[in-house]
Image (tube, helix red, strand yellow):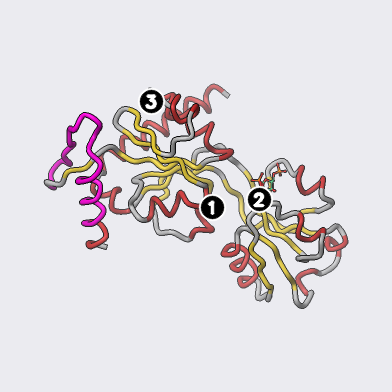
Amino acid sequence: MTLTLTLSLKRRGNKLPRPNGERVGVRGIGVEMNELTIALAKGRLLAPSLEIFEALGYDVREVRASRKLVVESGDVRFLIAKPMDVPIYVEHGAADVGIVGQDALRESGVNVYEPLVLGYGACRLVVAGKPALRDAEWRLLAGLRVASKYPRCTQKYFSARGLSAEVITLYGSIELAPMVHLADLIVDVVDTGRTLRENGLVELDEVFKSQAALIVNRASHTLRASEIRGLVEKINGTQTNADERR
Ligand code: PRP
């Protein structure tokens, strides 16, 4: 842990000065560091996540308008990453903070702090299959094949119930798998339910509920405690204001 932290601080301190060449010192520890780095998940969570930072006074127009993956704005730097990768960037310290769905977070199995849920990006991870399985005791079926882009969560769900299942990892359009007999079941996220309905599948069980969450690298949580505490409080404030407006 100490080694990783030292390397990560050196890398950030030495190679990523601010554009004007200024370095920002970290209070008390004598190590140079730069802007707080925030990894944001691409896709459905990006727009509401950017609205939060816009409400906090950050200029996010470049994130919206360009294909840049690193965008500096004021005293922060945004990294734009695939949802499943956001926890990895944060766990390894390439980002101090991230905003990601709890589905991707659980699947990644990373060791990070999760101080705040954000109330948007609500969805559910479910087990689904053809309607014929609704009444059948699918739990008793031998040789179950389950397709998912959440292999870790899927394995955990079936193992916790003492069921053996062959998990087939796919990267998208999971609903296709039962239709072409690649799998008996799927484990996937459901938002409106439209994709399941339009592909003749039904929900059989809920694995867990998910929403967007703020995650924090464990070392940053200590080394940049006041900055991160300030950010968490400000984000929490924007969420409270949004709740009051609803
Ligand atoms: C997700 C998920 C479902 C769909 C659920 O897929 O994997 O397929 O959304 O949404 P719904 O309940 O509102 O229909 P996504 O759009 O991320 O694309 P993918 O299948 O390529 O991963």
Residue placed under numbered mark 1 in the picture: 104
Q: Quadrant of the C terminus?
A: top right
Residue at disc 3, secondary structure: loop
Task: Check disc 1 and give the amino acid type.
Answer: Ala
Q: In terms of image quadrants, where is residue 183?
A: bottom right
- Whether the magenta-drawn stretch holds residue 17 is answered as yes
Question: Spatial distance from mark 3 to mark 2, Cα to Cα?
Answer: 31 Å
Residue placed under numbered mark 2 in the picture: 189
Foreground mark, 3 or 2, reads 3
Q: Which residues are magenta?
A: 6-29
- Whether the magenta-drawn stretch holds residue 37 is answered as no
- How many numbered circles are shown? 3
Task: Check disc 2 and give the amino acid type.
Answer: Val
Q: Position of residue 212 (x, y in %)?
A: 52, 42
Q: Earlier in the sequence, mark 1 or mark 3?
A: 3
Residue 162 or 9: which is nearer the viewer?
9
Would you place residue 126 above or below residue 140 in this image? above
